[in-house]
Amino acid sequence: MKENLIARATLGRLPLYLQYLQTLPANSCVNISATTIAKELGLGEVQVRKDLGSVIGTGKPKIGYVTKDIISKLEKVLGTNDKKYAILVGAGKLGRALFEYKGFEDYGLEITAAFDNDETKWSDTLSGKEIYPTDKLVEYCIEHNVKIGIIAVPESAAQAVCDMMLTAGITAIWNFAPISPIVPEGVLLQQENLALSLAHLKIQMLNSDK
Amino acid sequence: MKENLIARATLGRLPLYLQYLQTLPANSCVNISATTIAKELGLGEVQVRKDLGSVIGTGKPKIGYVTKDIISKLEKVLGTNDKKYAILVGAGKLGRALFEYKGFEDYGLEITAAFDNDETKWSDTLSGKEIYPTDKLVEYCIEHNVKIGIIAVPESAAQAVCDMMLTAGITAIWNFAPISPIVPEGVLLQQENLALSLAHLKIQMLNSDK
């Protein structure tokens, strides 16, 4: 099974499973069932079965899973031990919010530096990390072997920033600007649209009113 | 078809279709085909057919869709003419970024006010909108008939903020805090995890390296 086919909702729960399993005493919990995990985490059993199924397949009847196997599989899927570093361009409100967001660690991810054209920001640090001039981007990424870039600049600057990232050898881009920059084949581009979640909520609300 | 079953990716493209169709001269484009829409927007024809199919069904062979029918259906699904207002609690970096985010308008949504406990923020305005003390929340929501609340406070404050929203009559909550607050049945709760998109990108990257 290709890991990139794991559903977004499942992916959101995998760190929960991993954290729980890692806290278990190794000797007393050689095996564990989906039922136990579901109960301990307050989740539905069907959901846990489905989630684990998409990662590691079904457990053995009456025995369940080998605990250390699920742990190592979850670590592999989440890339916990294969930490990747990302940089961020655009230290505005959104950029700063992302820079300080705590949730990335669960997925073996860290944003190590931010870049901005505004020189008044260069003297700032965010959570002890530096904000650099944007023209240092290429040098930084090559030196630190960074392959993931986050675009948090306005629409008008997005393509130029994207081109700079490509020059820097970045191969995966998470873009918050409301245009889709042009990237060559082989470069992963993930377009973010914050409005979509709120729109989903509104549409559900409109439907439930009926 | 229930509108809340529309896929997230489709939902992201619907405003594109609507904007394009609204710019067409009404007389000369009574009908339009998925092929034309795909070509004009630089999208795949199969994708456009699938997107429109999930909203309005299939067009007539050789004729396509009645333009004004797609427009009104898209407006209905997106709730463009049924504008909803939201409030936000927590005017930190993330809250401010959301407050100033432009993309909500496409979905007939507006964040009209922010609330924060920190009195140094009360004198601020963001994009000309006010930041109020959190204890004004209930009064404000009732007075302005706001039914959507956004939680952008730290984990420790999330449940208290959520409870206050429920008292204020809010029925749909978009939560950015990394805990899932407890809400009664009938209240819509959408949990946001910003790390997921970056994690998805990383997992795709790990897989494409193989």
Image (spheres, coloured by chain):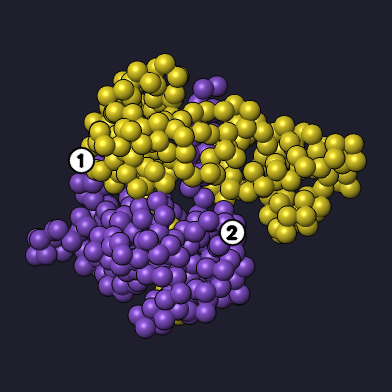
Chain colours: A yellow, B purple
- Disc 2 residue crowd, few under 14, some 14–19, many 20+, Cα 10 Å: few
- A204 above or below A65? below
Give the amino acid at mark 2. Ser
Q: Residue at x 59, y 45 (%)?
A: A11
Q: Between residues B52 and A3, which one lies in front from this camera angle?
A: A3
The mark closer to the camera, 2 or 1, is 2
Q: Where is residue B138 drawn, in percent x and y?
A: 45, 78
Position of the N terminus of chain A, as image quadrant, is: top right
Q: Where is residue A84 drawn, in percent x and y?
A: 52, 28
Q: Which mark is residue B156?
A: 2
Left or right of B162? Residue A91 is left
Left or right of B176? Residue A122 is left
Give the amino acid at mark 1. Ser
Q: Between residues A57 and A70, which one lies in front from this camera angle?
A: A70
Q: Residue at x 89, y 47 (%)?
A: A62
Quarter assignment of residue A58? top right
Q: Where is residue B75 drawn, in percent x and y?
A: 29, 67
Point out the residue furthest to the top here: A143
Instruction: Give the labeled residue for mark 1.
Output: A156
- Chain hosting mark 2: B
- Tally of numbered discs: 2
Q: Residue at x 78, y 57 (%)?
A: A39
- C-alpha distance separating marks 2 and 1: 38 Å
- B54 above or below A57? below
Q: Where is residue A100 drawn, in percent x and y?
A: 46, 43
